Image (cartoon, rainbow, N blue to C red):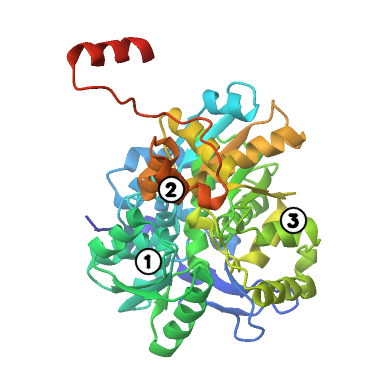
Amino acid sequence: MLQSAGATAANQSQTDIAFQRCINPSCAATYEARSVRTACDRCGELLDIAYEWDRASVPAKLSDFEAMWSRRYEPMRFSGVWRFHELLPFCRPDEIVTVGEGQTLLQQADAVAKFVGMNPGQLHLQYEGMNPSGSFKDNGMCAAFTHACMMGAQRAACASTGNTSASLALYCSATQKMKAVIFIGSGKISYGKLSQALDYGALTVQIAGDFDDAMIRVKQISEQLGIYLVNSVNPFRLEGQKTIMFRILEALRWQVPDWIVVPGGNLGNSSAFGKAFAELKQLGLIDRLPRLAVINAAGADTLYELYERRGVRWNDGKVDMDPIRAYNDHMDREGLKADTIASAIEINRPVNLKKCLRALDTMDGVVRQVCDQDILDAKAQVGAGGFGCEPASAASVAGAKLLRREGVIAPSDRVVCVLTGHELKDPTATVAYHTTDQEMFNKVLASRGVQKASHANRAIAVPNELDDIIKAIQLYS
């Protein structure tokens, strides 16, 4: 049920401390927070939400946020996003929209640590699939949706591989204030995710093309029809996604881990994480930064290609655009489309590329790519530990295993892998991996280069006879 967080005179936020700022240091144009923009009017670059921190009510230390747990009867403090309102104070408490997002878990996963090659107690999984719509997207959506309500929006739109559309549709349905308009590519969304958007009443527009095509169209449509755009070009989305890192620190008793490992698709998460830690360091709330690893699927590895192979860097905001343009032209000439079982990160042109480059620079980051075979093997190991995830999520675990094998991550490092979505987001991939049906395996997985299911947990076929069933249980259990 939608709840509107109440405000008191003591905790009213002065929203004029927040403003939008161009990420291009040579431009740095600023705009009011209470305005709708997805790019700088002057130079066309992405925008940040920035704050006059000396005027904000920031706690003296992170552990002060623990007091918020005693106020969980307040909708704002029950939310795992708005509990940290003082670190994203772009709105007043009475303007906040929440559906109870952010009730997530950081799990110490020793069985997965063994698979990755880590010491016991050193690998943790941040399970964002526990959000109301089943993915991390709710962290950012509640922030963007709050801003949309502040601006009086009547419709909100997104392009989606599935999770963003499910999240937007949920918030629109819960509030009954807006209509969701979602754009998806043909054949590029799992039924688990599509079912949510349809069930929640969203207007679903399926175009002939992939996510990148849908992203171009939704930006055009939103501008022409005055529809509020909630894709992660919207800077308020990333403000909400920062709080994933705050909850990780909270679960680790405010100790900074050595590594954050995250799947890379549209690169909103990695961008938000870099901003979160940069701000915490600026505010003196942490004394060091973790390192960042962004993991692409091999079938959608634009960031890996640009960062690790072509040397594209943030370079204090002076990003060399020539390699980026050359690679985009190459993809267009060859007709290359993203293709991976990890559909949530099946994106060729990540809109937050430059913000991610900045995050990699801030956090001394690395980028890797992993194949679908490695992703599904890692997914099976995560599931065997009791917390299943969708394929894209498992890219973080597969990436950690690769970095451990390379010696980049030490076995004694404290590593957090972010699991971005719930297992039931894409049950077809899970069943195909564990199935005894070779035809299904070939259709869903082998067509994408997955040759074997090394960690499959297959069903046992037995006659419908009591003695045979008992023998099978005794044999295999």
- Between circles 3 and 1, the one closer to the viewer is 3
**Residue 201: horizontal and vertical position, in percent?**
23, 67
Q: Residue at x 33, y 25 (%)?
A: 460
Query: Dot 3 corresponds to which residue?
Result: 361
The answer to whether residue 323 is left or right of residue 42 is: right
Which of the 4 image quadrants contains residue 285?
A: top right
Residue 339 versus residue 29 in the image, above or below: above
Which of the 4 image quadrants contains residue 315?
A: bottom right
**Which mark is drawn over residue 421?**
2
**Mark 2 residue type:** Gly
Q: Toward the viewer: 299 or 419? A: 299
Disc 3 is placed on an element classified as helix
**Which mark is drawn over residue 146?**
1
Q: Residue at x 48, y 56 (%)?
A: 344
Which of the 4 image quadrants contains residue 257?
A: top right
Circle 2 packing at 10 Å, graded few (<14), some (14-19), many (20+), is: many
